[in-house]
Amino acid sequence: MNSPLSPKAIAEQASAAEAYKSKPYRYYALAVLTLVYVFNFVDRQIIVILSEYIIEDLDLTLAQYGMLSGIAFAAIYCVFGIPIARYADKGNRRNVIAVSLTVWSFFTAMCGSVTNFWQLFAARFGVGIGEAGGSPPAHSMVSDIFPVNERATALSIYSLGVYGGILVGFVGGAYLVQWFDWRVAFIVVGLPGILLAILLRLTVKEPPRGFSETREDVGSDTSFKDVLALLWSRKAFRHLAFACALHAFVTYGVGNFMVIFLSRVHEMPNLEIGKIYGLVAGIGGLAGTLAGGWLSDKISERTGNRNWYIWIPLISTLAAVPFAINTFLFMDSGLTAALSWALPVFFGGFYLAPCIAMTHGMVGLRMRALSSAVLFFVLNLIGLGLGPILTGYVADLLTPEFGIDGIRYAMTLTILVNIWCAFHYFMCTRTLKDSLDNAPA
């Protein structure tokens, strides 16, 4: 059980509860959290649009670049994500996010001062430490702010930060590297996050736990081991987590090499890649992310079948495969390849919000940040950690025989992992209802 609240804490909770009764304030808080997530992905993915400049300047292999854009970030993100989320489930989630934003913004700027592979690797570690405290506490806040039948939609709005960050990072990064160099680009995108952290801290209130469901927060002394045991006991969660991980394996394994693919295979100029591919990936992903959450809420509510929260990601994952293969193998110019990526990235955005909503549905009020962290641990370790490095490794293996087309064939093999991913989504639907019905109070 938590210690009794002080009079000051009780007054703060009452003030926050009154504020969140206002629909405009709920959406203001969601907007600020979404903007933080945009910064999260700008700082995480800026390395992708700058990839060719970094590879040339630091004399890197594609496998080394895959490490920088993947495992260097993912490993430390996964290690720190769980203890930070555990603290967030007990303490003030808004403050955790504000501090984390400050840390990752500082280390993003520090990436601009490196002179070799290992220095950049270490700086990316720092970015991962900060970003580990971003999403899980935010997911928990959103679930407390919005009721169950609006939760996937609200989480899909929050998840727009993924593709909003890609859009800003690609288009903005492409212009920055034209005006300055790749080191300055890191500094310019990193430092503004510190100002956003101040805005978050001063204007967004910590929501009372259970507010959206009018459930009383009686506290919890549940240990990390207990939460992990609960999640592991749910077959639905095990399949859901692995499906999300494989989904992310494809997303990062392909997405982190799109700039190199368009540049080397189609000889597309970097500024054109940033503008055209950045807009296509950003807008397509934004639309898909919003559609996935909205459709899941609407169809599940209309049919009374919560399996639609998983059927939507399953169907969209399979739908992306033929369109993606068409992009890699049959488009004859950079422009047509970039434009044809709109449908794969649209379908690829459907999965995240429904999967987070279902994960929160399986656990108690003070387990939500930690459950998100466990989900993201699996997702990022396999997806972000292994996706880019294995795609880069396969591309390096194929290059001696196929030349610049080695990257084309490596990305094609990566996209086929979606079929494996869809199998685990299907297996999740078989026990999802039981896992949701037996969630702790």
Image (cartoon, rainbow, N blue to C red):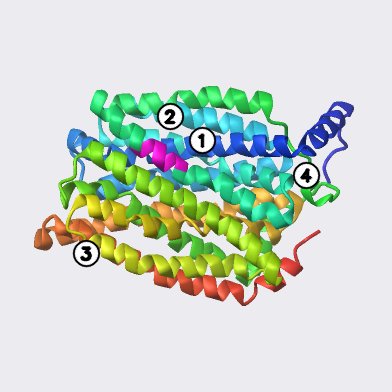
Where residue 191 appears, as percent x and y from the top left, is 45, 23
- The circle drawn on residue 329 is 3
Is 358 on the left-hand or right-hand side of 52? Answer: right
Disc 4 marks which amino acid? Arg
Instruction: Sort mark 3 into few (<14), some (14-19) or many (20+) by Cα contacts within 10 Å.
Output: some
Residue that badge 1 annotates = 130
Secondary structure under badge 3? helix
Secondary structure under badge 1? helix
Secondary structure mostly taken by the magenta-highlighted segment of the chain: helix
Tell me if label 2 and label 1 are in contact, CB under 8 Å.
yes
- Return the residue nearer the eye: 227 or 198: 198
Measure the C-alpha gap from mark 3 to mark 4: 50 Å
Residue that badge 2 annotates = 107
Measure the C-alpha gap from mark 3 to mark 2: 38 Å
Label located before the other in sequence (4 or 1): 1
Give the residue displayed 59% in from the left and 61% down from the top: 295
